[in-house]
Image (cartoon, grey):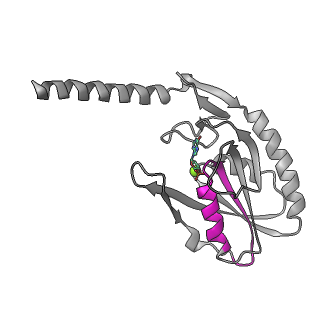
Amino acid sequence: MKTHKFLILFLFMTFNLIALDTYEKNIDNLKLYISYEQINDRIVKLSDELNEIYKDKEVLVVLVLKGSIIFASDLIKELKGNFILETIKASSYGMKGSNRQKLQLFGLENLEIENKHVILIDDIFDSGNTLYNIKQAFLEKNPSSVRTIVLLKKNIKRDITYLPDYSLFDIDDKFVVGYGLDYKECFRNLKGIYIVNEK
Ligand code: IMP
Ligand code: MG
């Protein structure tokens, strides 16, 4: 009898989890937050600034996979001059129930950074740990300069004081998808930035 109750409870919980996942992955439940036109506008303004700063310089543009792919590809199309493109992959893992996360970087060992002007591009600055740690790892390889760019920065209190050099939009503390950002690998292909509609 007891097993019976557990089985019903288990099935109920599984059903709820699947329903929630299906709801969150449903494109109809997304609300447009920032349009492609708004993003493009900011990209053009930022690229004007970068073209001025890096005039006559060779620059290593490093994009953090996968979230910044779409943003970075639109941005670099607006850059003039000698920009070399590289990628790096970052993933963080932590103990269940703990906020402490350890960042793993893949691809850094293959990059020639010494005496280079580096631009690091990431999709979103949330806790800031990812970008801060990537920047520190780059600084250890003695570049001439490192500037960091993110598409989005969440308006939240952080443990760290470091901030990216450029962020195109400051946003509310909501989970956003689209334009490279994903929810469980979905929605990266959307042209604008969306929030999952609160139920
Ligand atoms: P941070 O280290 O907390 O700043 O986290 C940065 C990474 O978390 C980003 O590069 C994203 O991959 C992911 N992330 C944080 N917030 C969001 C979000 O709202 N939507 C999608 N991905 C997010
Ligand atoms: Mg990311």
Of residues 121 and 95, the one nearer the viewer is 95
Which residue is at a point 61% across and 70% down the rendered structure image?
137
Screen quadrant of the N terminus: top left
Q: Is residue 189 left or right of residue 147?
A: left
Q: Position of residue 33 (x, y in %)?
A: 68, 30
Depth order, front residue of 146/83: 146
Q: Residue at x 77, y 56 (%)?
A: 165
Image quadrant where residue 17 sits: top left
| Image x and y of residue 77, in percent | 77, 51
Tell me which corner region of the image, top left, top right, bottom left or bottom right, holds residue 145: bottom right
Q: Which residues are magenta?
A: 114-139
Does the magenta-highlighted stretch encompass residue 131? Answer: yes
Residue 52 position within the rendered picture, expressed as x and y whole percent measured from the top left: 90, 59
How far from the left and from the top, in percent, is residue 102? 49, 61
Q: Is residue 196 left or right of residue 1?
A: right
**Image-based side of 46 in relation to 18, left or right:** right
- Of residues 139 and 27, the one nearer the viewer is 139
Identify which residue is drawn at 65% across, 53% down.
122
Q: Residue at x 19, y 28 (%)?
A: 6
